[in-house]
Image: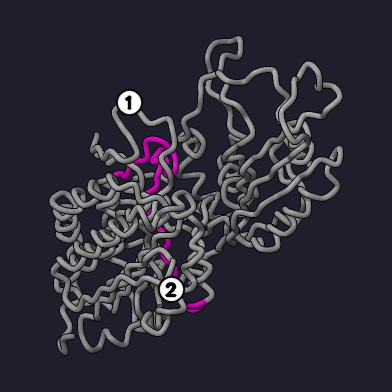
Amino acid sequence: MNDRCPPDVLQAEHLLAQISRQWDGDILQQLRHYIAIPAKSPAFDADWAQHGYLERVVQNAADWVLAQPVAGLRLEIIRLPGQTPVLYFEIAATCASDATRPSVLMYGHLDKQPEMTGWRNDLGPWTPKLDDGRLYGRGGADDGYAVYAAIAAVAALQRQQRAHPRVVGLIETCEESGSFNLLQYVDLLRPRLGDVGLVICLDSGAGNYDQLWATTSLRGVASGVLKVEILTEGVHSGDASGLVPSSFRIMRQVLDRLEDSASGRLLPDVFHCAIPAERRAQAQVTAGILGAEIHRRFPWVHADCGAGNTFALPTTTDPVQGLLNQTWVPALSVTGADGFAQLADAGNVLRPYTAFKLSLRLPPLVDAALAAQQLKTLLEDNAPYQARVTFAPGGHASGWNAPETSPWLEAALQSASSLHFGAPCGYIGQGGTIPLMNMLAAGFPRAQMMVCGVLGPKSNAHGPNEFLHVAFAKKLTAAVAEVIARVPHTAA
């Protein structure tokens, strides 16, 4: 640590140029190597330890970080017994006076979702391809880029001799499985994390690629497998149908307790919460920016409605209500099914059981643990026809609502967006879940939160053809550097 601080001047144009060169000359190649490794999260790879893919991506990232010319850098890969590894790094404050500033905690993850079907013929989940400024492949945007962007941002500040506070990094490998072991690592590292005044989470999304976007809220989630059993084995449908109730029809009846199938509204009040006035107001502003792109960005099928081909319709074309529906209104998805034969093998047999994997997205202020208990009771009690109905919970995590933004952070976000995007910072809620945010909010109640990411329109995280928008990622990296440099001594 130096006693003399560098000048408090940041040349935005040079900063972005430096970061762009590092992306083009180094980071993109690192991400190509990363995408090629099927480092699936433990929920999707029970033999993750034997396969060693998570260990490889963590070690590769660690090797790259240690090779960067970043002053005051220390790094450690932490491995708790039986748990996926965590990469932890520290970068000392630039000078003695900056050591009194609160620390910046940077977060990302390196584990991935499974392959998914439907990739373009020339693409694949483990086959990186740069096409028209987009790097395709699983995990690059969600969010393998995070550790590389975080280090690049600090390195750029140091190259410009710009003062920065102490920076710590937490890169996990269990996020796509609900971060079920992260709290153990946070507790272990808490004395080393220090006085955190700003959390920068790089695992979120963007409303478009034209400006910086700050995430204001995240939905929670409760998941599990609902199984309906009526027979011990399959029987001839001609002999049994009409007398033996279909397990699928029973499944429909059970789900009718939870969801109005006509509207998609979740029926129990326990899964709803009041939407804060501030979030409604922000949705109005964001709807004015994005308009119909809020729903048009999805890959809708064409439908023949008798008057020519048209697109399938969303639940609402009102942009404000659309934003609220995907961020503050609970919603049910069936993400998997069992008990069904493949179509080519489906004979005239009444199946003995039907099983669905359910994903229930919860509003940010709903207690996920309570919701999971209520969900199990609702689905299992008083089964139709006295069938065996069981719900095996698969995990839950509460959502997150951002604290009030401090004036310094608001100014920093707006300045960073204006400098590097030429447009004001936008504010948007996200429908996904990042369990860490609630943990950090509880552990560092005075910290400000900059939750952002590269998952913009059609980037399709978790689905086929996932991509990272390279030009946007470069500008986001520069914007992060700007915000880090502006952390004041009174941030915490």
Residue 236 percent location from the top left of the image = 75, 20
Three-letter amino acid code at the position of disc 1: Asn
Residue 410 percent location from the top left of the image = 41, 66
Q: Secondary structure at mark 1?
A: loop
Residue 455 vertical placement versus 368 (above, below): above
> How far is mark 2 from mark 1, CA to CA?
40 Å
Residue 466 in the magenta stretch? The answer is yes
Density class for disc 2 (Cα within 10 Å; few <14, some 14-19, many ≥20) is some
Q: Residue at left 62%, top 20%?
A: 346
Residue 163 percent location from the top left of the image = 21, 77
Density class for disc 1 (Cα within 10 Å; few <14, some 14-19, many ≥20) is few
Q: Nearer the viewer, residue 406 or 110?
A: 110
Three-letter amino acid code at the position of disc 2: Tyr
Residue 144 in the magenta stretch? The answer is no
Mark number displayed over residue 121: 1
The residue stretch that appears in magenta: 443-469
Q: Main secondary structure of the magenta part?
A: loop
Query: Which residue is the site of mark 2?
Result: 185
Q: Quadrant of the C terminus?
A: bottom left
